[in-house]
Image: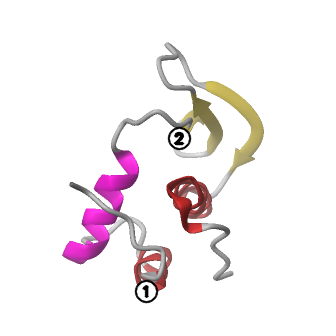
Amino acid sequence: MYTFDPSRIDLAEEFKANPFGEHSPDLQYLLNLMRLPNDQPYYMLVVAEPYKRWTLALKEPGGTAPRLTNTVFTDLEVAEWEVFKLRWKALGGGELVLD
């Protein structure tokens, strides 16, 4: 059974420093856990304009299409960090503030 340990702030720091590279086994485990379908709303990014703009979206459990928010990003690294923090909070880790 997958479990989440909110005390592992080091994994959040690792992701923030390198969101697109190879990750440690523990961080990859956490990312896999964050991506598992469950009964909670799921945050994701939707490409608004390839390589230029991404929109934050929320997919409800059992829903067919994600609901777009008014949050738009022009920096993919910033966008990925925001989604990571939202998923962290959804897993029960509370607000993640490393900025």
The quarter of the picture where the N terminus appears is bottom left
Q: Is residue 26 magenta?
A: yes
Whether residue 13 is situated above or below residue 74 in the rendered picture: below
Q: Residue furthest right?
A: 70
x and y percentages locating residue 31 in the rendered image? 34, 59
Outermost residue on the top side: it is 64
Q: Which mark is residue 10?
A: 1
Horizontal and vertical percent for residue 99? 68, 81
Give how far across and how far down residue 22 sits, in percent. Answer: 24, 71
Label 2, label 1: how many angstroms apart (C-alpha)?
A: 23 Å
Q: Is residue 34 left or right of residue 9?
A: left
The answer to which quarter of the image holds residue 69 is: top right
Residue that numbered label 2 is attached to? 44
> For the magenta stretch, what is the residue range?
23-35
Mark 2 or 1 closer to N-term? 1
- Colour mode? secondary structure
Between disc 2 and disc 1, the foreground one is 1
Residue at 43%, 86% (x, y): give it.
Answer: 10
- The kind of secondary structure element at disc 1 is helix
Q: Residues within 10 Å of mark 2 (few under 14, many from 20)?
A: many
Residue type indicated by callout 2: Met
* Magenta residue check for 22: no
Residue at image coords 40%, 36%: 38
